[in-house]
Amino acid sequence: MAESAFDVVVIGSGPGGYVAAIRATQLGLKTACVEKRETLGGTCLNIGCIPSKALLYSSEVFDEARHGMAIHGVKVGEVGLDLPAMMAQKTKVVDANTAGVAFLFKKNKVEWIKGAGRITAPGKIEVALNAGGSQSLTARGIIIATGSDSMPLPGVPVDERSIVTSTGALTLASVPKRLIVIGGGYIGLEMGSVWQRLGSQVTVVEFLDRILPGMDGEVSKQMQRILQKQGMTFKLGMKVTGATAGDAGVAVRIEPAKGGPSQSLVADIVLLAIGRQPLTEGLGLESAGVALDERGRIKTDVHFATNVPGIYAIGDVIAGPMLAHKAEDEGVAVAEIIAGQAGHVNYEAIPGVVYNWPEAASVGKTEEQLKAEGVAYKAGKFPFTANGRARAMAMTDGFVKILADAKTDRILGAHILGANAGDLIAEIVVGMEFGAAAEDIARTCHAHPTLNEAVKEAALAVGGRAIHI
Ligand SMILES: Cc1cc2nc3c(=O)[nH]c(=O)nc-3n(C[C@H](O)[C@H](O)[C@H](O)COP(=O)(O)OP(=O)(O)OC[C@H]3O[C@@H](n4cnc5c(N)ncnc54)[C@H](O)[C@@H]3O)c2cc1C
């Protein structure tokens, strides 16, 4: 069969891959994107960010109708759950998003090749087509954007029925009475919250002695307190040694991480959410000579180039935070680099958001990191209890914390726990991209009454001059 020749072939159509493909065609490069899933958009659109946020929002509406309206003087009758309708809404959201990427591919003339891609030599890809048969492609630049998969745990056999990953947790047919979540990271907490709001008793088992490792310690602590108030139970510093599914449910064996007697917990469903691992299998990397790092990620330089000329990699399959917007930014940068431009990603200013309620959002350094690095810093903090808009919304949990260099006042990090924290953090991310000092945010006029005023007040607090506290 004749080879199809492209300037760029992207393997994988997640937020890294599809964005890279679109940007490459914008830059005049003839581009194909190989995707083995039936729909575009990768983990993020199909089984990650989008369906989880759809369920988080729908379950929030349910929870609000049950518990959050009386305070505003709104009386509702008995509130019931129609889980199939909630799931159908989630599916509709996913379908609209994946179809949106297909539309963008058409509009930008990205050729979508449906099948599994394998690199046979530098510049050469063989696609095992979903429809049967194969297709050979050649490209000046190959971008690997194959993403990640959930991390397995020995002794915990996933069947996606009673022991599930996040993928199974997004499609449960009924509300489990008891749900055990293994892993206190953002995926476990978000999916735990969904089912807790819908009626499950949720127990989170975490190996470390804190949830949300990597986030600011104060945010983690308060988030845990709030989730406990909402009814979640935490077993921290506990190691899961095995899980067995039986007629009476799933028995999960746990023991203290530091050693000690083991105990058994029982649940109807167990969600394994201990992290994700890069997906490199079947790509032909070994024969192409593409090097991996010690954690199985594809090794790249600052220009996303692997050790093999003409082969690049981006997104979850390389180092860095496994986040959709990080993958997207790398997609833009790598396409620009292949086109001869100066694509670049600033890893100092990548926000991270946890979409529980309230949300937690973070950018830059945590206090723990600054202390460990011996950086002299000032912290400014402002609680939402003192913010007029938060009071009006009856959502006063949480705070804004801004960390700035003690000498220069340059913002080094910010951490927000509270309503709409994921949106509020954007102001600080922009500020950090422009090298802002806390003073710059503090002297910027913020509309009143808004939640953003808490950001301004925290910036004022860095200089010891918050007005409203
Ligand atoms: C439950 C959940 C919730 C999440 N929520 C968020 C969130 O709120 N915000 C956020 O920023 N991130 C979130 N993430 C993480 C986010 O989904 C990933 O960081 C992001 O999808 C990574 O993008 P990517 O392009 O690197 O890869 P992916 O999105 O994983 O896409 C890779 C694609 O490559 C395809 N592929 C793999 N191998 C081949 C092959 N050989 N040939 C052809 N195709 C192949 C796969 O089928 C897949 O479609 C979440 C993840 C999960 C699981």
Image: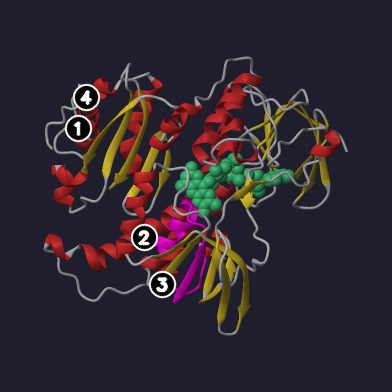
Please name the residue that numbered disc 3 is placed on: 200
Foreground: disc 3 or disc 1: 1
Q: Is residue 296 left or right of residue 65?
A: right
Pointer 2: what residue? 58
Instruction: Inspect the image, locate mark 3, and give the three-letter code of the amino acid beneath it.
Output: Ser
- The structure residue drawn at horizontal position 50% and vertical position 28%, both measured from the top left corner, is 347
Q: Position of residue 436 (x, y in %)?
A: 33, 20
Residue 183 shown in magenta = yes
Whole-Å distance between the Cαs marked 3 and 1? 38 Å
- Residue wearing tag 1: 457
| Mark 4: amino acid | Gly
How far apart, in angstroms, are the residues tagged by discs 3 and 4? 45 Å
Residues rendered magenta in the picture = 171-194
Q: Residue at x 21, y 43 (%)?
A: 383
Q: Which numbered dot is residue 463? A: 4
Image coordinates for residue 339, horizontal then vertical, percent: 64, 18
User: Residue 89 in the image: x percent, y percent?
Assistant: 42, 61
